[in-house]
Image (tube, rainbow, N blue to C red):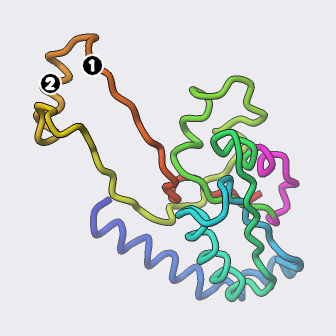
Amino acid sequence: MGFFLQALWVGVFALTTAVAPNATSAQGGFPTRPITLVVPTAAGGPTDTVARLIAESMSRTLGPTVVVENVSGAGGTIGMARVAKAAPDGYTIAVWHVGQATAPALYDGLKYDVVNDFDHLGRITDVPMTLVSKTPFPANNVTELLAWIGSQGDRQAMATQVSARPHTCVRWC
């Protein structure tokens, strides 16, 4: 995302935060009770850390406490299923990452629809990614890696590690 777009989003967020108390009172006093912020991972990781920072800020802005609830297991699908089944009243939200987009390819019989059961509110963070290989690997950069992959046909083996990257999916029910 370019600098201009990032600056624009920061401005939109700042404006939204500034008018949030007035908008909240105009909508009949929402929120009137604690909000649950589901993190579909175990406590203590990067997604949990970001969620707790956001919850603190949301509590200050909105009034009621925002409680972080860690619901881990099955690559985040247990926690996201809980959020998908929550009442659509705005009191259950989630922070998740690209694992939400890959869940249908990895898990049969998901208890939710990753596209239609969630509303994306926005990006929270960006995390740089790293490519790692064994020391004697013939590629030294991405261009060389792509050339090597092309030259190998079906003989290459690779894996991915989807770490807790808290930026992709936020749902407001």
**Residue 116 picture location, percent across and down:** 69, 39
Residue picked out by circle 2: 148
Number of residues whose C-alpha sits closer than 10 Å to that of mark 1, classed few (under 14), some (14–19) or many (20 or more): few
Point 77% across, 43% down: residue: 81
How many tags in the picture? Answer: 2
- For the magenta stretch, what is the residue range? 81-91
Q: Amino acid at mark 2?
A: Trp
Q: Mark 1 is on which residue type? A: Gln
Q: Is residue 77 left or right of residue 102?
A: right
Within the magenta stretch, is there residue 83?
Answer: yes
Toward which corner of the image does residue 39 lie, by quadrant?
A: bottom right
Q: Are marks 1 and 2 in contact (CB under 8 Å)?
A: yes
For numbered disc 1, what is the local secondary structure?
loop
> For mark 1, what is the residue?
156
Describe residue 165's horizontal placement relative to residue 75 as left or right: left
Mark 2: give few (<14), some (14-19) or many (20+) Cα within 10 Å.
some
Q: Nearer the viewer, residue 26 or 149?
A: 149
The image shows residue 153, relative to residue 110, as above or below, that is: above
